Amino acid sequence: MLKAITAVFVIKVDGIKVTVKKGQVPDYFIREIKLIQRSAQAIQGKIYGMRRGQQINLECSSSIPENILQRLRNVWKPNPSPKNDGGLKRR
């Protein structure tokens, strides 16, 4: 519960449904989550964007496997620029 309060953003992933519960998330990141879902790796849980100094790092609930979290970390840009991906949007 404390993570959800202190997180910059919270994304809930439930099977094929991806919902931003708090904050704003870059479009490219939502697309990557959906790509993972389509690759027959249905996941359920929450992904948190936690501020660490000037960067936003990713953390997740224990129901999301570490290999999936690592895949998301590989594409995550710690300081996303709105100019690079068409803006930050809430879905």
Image (cartoon, grey):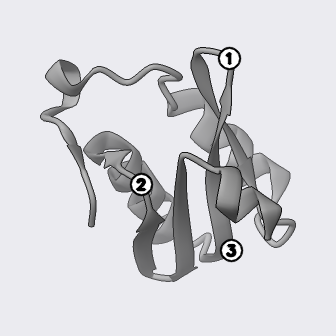
SS category of the residue bearing label 1: loop
Name the residue: 49% across, 69% down.
37
Res 53 label: 1
Residue 30 badge = none
Give x and y (percent) for residue 73.
63, 34
Examine the rendered structure and indicate whether residue 90 appears above or below residue 83: below
Q: Are marks 3 and 2 in contact (CB under 8 Å)?
A: no
Q: In the rendered image, which quarter contains the C terminus? A: bottom left
- The crowding category of the residue bearing disc 1, from other C-alpha atoms within 10 Å (few below 14, some 14 to 19, many at least 20), is few
Gap in angstroms between the C-alphas marked 2 and 1: 18 Å
Mark nearest the camera among 3 and 2 is: 2
| Amino acid type assigned to the residue bearing label 3 in the image | Gly
Type of amino acid under label 2: Gly
Residue at the image point whose x is 78% and y is 48% from the top: 67
**Helix, strand, or loop for circle 2?**
loop
Residue placed under numbered mark 2 in the picture: 23
Image position of 2 with respect to 1: above or below: above
Horizontal side of 22 relative to 1 (left or right) equals left
Q: Position of residue 44 (x, y in %)?
A: 66, 78
**Secondary structure at numbered mark 3:** strand
Q: Position of residue 45 (x, y in %)?
A: 68, 74
Left or right, 85 with respect to 12, comes to: left
Question: Compared with residue 4, is residue 71 higher up or lower down, i.e. above or below?
Answer: above
Pick the residue in front: 63 or 82.
82
Identify residue for label 3. 45
Closer to the camera in the image, 29 or 23: 23
Amino acid type of the residue tagged 1 in the rendering: Gly
